[in-house]
Image: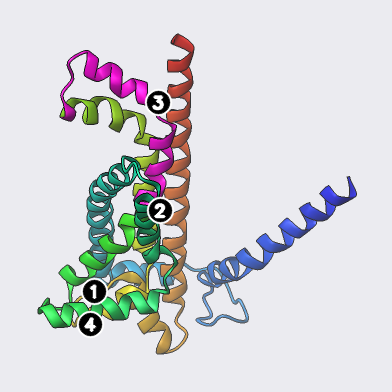
């Protein structure tokens, strides 16, 4: 009992340390005083300033377009990669492929960003929308693979054998048996890739060209110019959107689990 109480206290302390700076930032985004001290009164001026900034709204649009496109494309490549790894029979090649897949996940973002910058410079890709999109796809694909692989490992081979015995083609097996079964992993991979893309700074900073920017790079650039509570307001909006993504993923996952439970009950 005593150990459980100490664990709870430790957990609460960790959450306070993690979330206190965020709530501090949110609190002062409503400060009419214009600084992150001496709260003078409640105001929505800084949020109005964010929505009145046309350039910032374009950057927001760029960020979401990059995130959605890179996540959708990453899901396609991630499913293909997970299937390729899953159906490798020999243990050593499978472990080698898994290790290569995990390189981009465990490698420092600075090294990844610098590598992409050198690559794009050598092959002549202009820094901007395309370079950022390709970079986000590259670091999102391994995330999707990691999310999809466990679902593939849970799937019984007899499902595929039964489908083939009934005359299903390889395409029908993929689209009507495998994809529906691994759908929770696909959704998890998509939302994880979307979150990573929205939050990424280090890689994007290296591959962003003149005239194109994302929210993370823009916030960094504005923060270097000094404290402005419009940055607080913008960061608050991003934080709230991330929470909505997490909640959305939670409800989708819960619905999938209920569907799976009902299917097993009928079976």
Check contact, mark 2 vs mark 4: CB within 8 A.
Answer: no
Which residue is label 2 attached to? Answer: 95
Q: Residues within 10 Å of mark 2 (few under 14, many from 20)?
A: few
Q: Residues within 10 Å of mark 4 (few under 14, many from 20)?
A: few
Q: Secondary structure at mark 3?
A: loop
In the image, what residue occupies the spot 44% across and 68% down? 235
Q: Earlier in the sequence, mark 2 or mark 3?
A: 2
Q: Earlier in the sequence, mark 1 or mark 2?
A: 1
Q: Is residue 173 left or right of residue 48?
A: left
Horizontal and vertical percent position of residue 131: 19, 71
**Residue found at the far top of this picture:** 266
Check contact, mark 3 vs mark 1: CB within 8 A.
Answer: no
Q: Earlier in the sequence, mark 4 or mark 1?
A: 1
- The Cα atoms of the two marked residues, 3 and 1, are separated by 52 Å
In this view, the mark in front (2 or 4): 2
Q: Residues within 10 Å of mark 3 (few under 14, many from 20)?
A: few
Q: Nearer the viewer, residue 251 or 116?
A: 116
């Amino acid at each position: 009992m005593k150990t459980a109480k100490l664990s709870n206290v430790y957990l609460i302390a960790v959450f306070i340390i993690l979330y206190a700076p965020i709530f501090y930032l949110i609190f002062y985004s409503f400060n009419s005083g214009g600084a992150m001290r001496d709260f003078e009164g409640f105001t929505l001026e800084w949020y109005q300033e964010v929505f009145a900034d046309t350039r910032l709204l374009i950057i927001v649009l760029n960020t979401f377009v990059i995130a959605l496109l890179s996540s959708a494309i990453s899901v396609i490549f991630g499913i293909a990669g997970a299937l390729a790894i899953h159906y490798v029979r020999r243990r050593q090649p499978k472990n080698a492929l898994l290790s290569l897949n995990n390189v981009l996940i465990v490698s420092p973002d600075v090294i990844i960003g610098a590598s992409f910058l050198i690559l794009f410079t050598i092959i002549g890709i202009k820094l901007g929308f395309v370079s950022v999109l390709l970079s986000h796809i590259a670091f999102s694909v391994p995330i999707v693979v990691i999310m999809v692989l466990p679902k593939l490992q849970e799937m019984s081979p007899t499902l595929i054998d039964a489908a083939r015995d009934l005359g299903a083609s390889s395409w029908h097996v993929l689209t009507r048996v495998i994809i529906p079964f691994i759908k929770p992993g696909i959704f998890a991979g998509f939302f994880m890739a979307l979150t990573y893309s929205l939050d990424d700074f280090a890689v994007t900073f290296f591959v962003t060209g003149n005239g194109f920017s994302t929210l993370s790079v823009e916030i960094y650039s504005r923060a270097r110019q000094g404290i402005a509570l419009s940055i607080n307001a913008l960061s608050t909006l991003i934080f709230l959107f991330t929470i909505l993504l997490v909640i959305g993923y939670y409800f989708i996952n819960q619905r999938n689990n209920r569907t799976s439970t009902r299917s097993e009950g009928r079976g």
